[in-house]
């Protein structure tokens, strides 16, 4: 009897990394790897960048958690009652930035929505580390929105209703954050993000 047919692999077959280069990758400092990757992408044909981005997305899709764990500590209250960045905030923001940087804007927006939600009920000094961090998060949300628009324009959104839900949840959280800041006389920290999402229709 003939052997059963096997489906063809749609992804390119990966070769082995050269042993010496694998040793470099495993032992190089993070800054050295960043410099090498940036130079490689800047001096290579566009197809190399496209392949790199696709591989990055596949890796992040495999590793990406859909929601923050309940025990996550993004912000903490100091003795004066004001909020300070918590120990889990930096890695969560790094993950969100990796997601939108790789073109996974909607996944990043879902994560950043959780981050913004964690500011509800908090107070902070605008001229403090927390104020600076919130300004950075505002910029992150704005960039994630742009990444999501490009994801949508590139026809890479498989779940359109889910994407609309993500945008709706972000809009709702930002609205609540603005109302919450007004209640205690604080400055709404996500003004750029709110303006970016207010008129986004798709």
Image: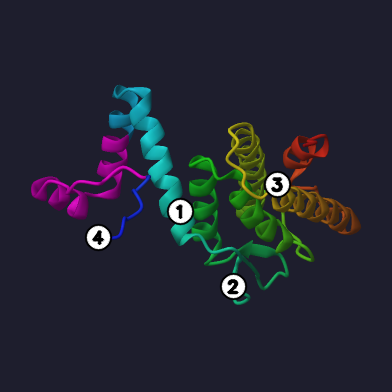
Residue 155: percent from left, percent from top: 60, 36
Q: Is residue 103 left or right of residue 141?
A: left
Depth-wise, is mark 1 or mark 3 nearer the camera? 3
N-term mark: 4 or 1: 4
Circle 3/circle 2 CB separation < 8 Å: no
Q: Residues within 10 Å of mark 3 (few under 14, many from 20)?
A: few
Q: Is residue 90 left or right of residue 29?
A: right
Residue 175: which disc?
A: none
Magenta extent: 11-37
Judging from the image, what secondary structure is the residue with disc 1 in? Answer: helix
Residue that numbered label 4 is attached to: 3
Residue that numbered label 1 is attached to: 60
Up/down of 32 relative to 129, above or below: above
Q: Gap between marks 2 and 1, in whole Å? A: 18 Å
Report the residue at 42% width, 39% height from top: 53
Residue 64: percent from left, percent from top: 50, 60
């Amino acid at each position: 009897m003939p052997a059963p047919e096997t489906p063809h692999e749609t992804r390119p077959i990966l070769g082995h990394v050269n042993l010496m280069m694998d040793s470099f990758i495993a032992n190089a400092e993070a800054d050295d790897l960043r410099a090498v990757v940036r130079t490689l992408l800047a001096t290579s044909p566009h197809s190399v960048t496209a392949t790199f981005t696709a591989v990055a997305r596949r890796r992040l899709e495999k590793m990406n958690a859909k929601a923050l764990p309940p025990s996550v500590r993004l912000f903490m209250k100091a003795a004066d009652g004001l909020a300070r960045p918590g120990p889990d905030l930096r890695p969560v923001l790094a993950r969100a930035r990796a997601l939108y940087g790789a073109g996974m804007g909607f996944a990043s927006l879902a994560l950043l929505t959780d981050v913004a939600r964690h500011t509800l009920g908090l107070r902070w000094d605008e001229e403090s580390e927390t104020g600076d961090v919130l300004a950075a998060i505002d910029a992150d949300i704005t960039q994630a929105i742009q990444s999501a628009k490009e994801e949508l324009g590139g026809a890479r959104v498989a779940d359109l209703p889910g994407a609309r839900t993500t945008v709706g949840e972000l809009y709702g959280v930002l609205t609540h954050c603005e109302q919450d800041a007004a209640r205690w006389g604080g400055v709404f920290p996500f003004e750029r993000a709110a303006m970016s999402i207010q008129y986004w229709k798709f």
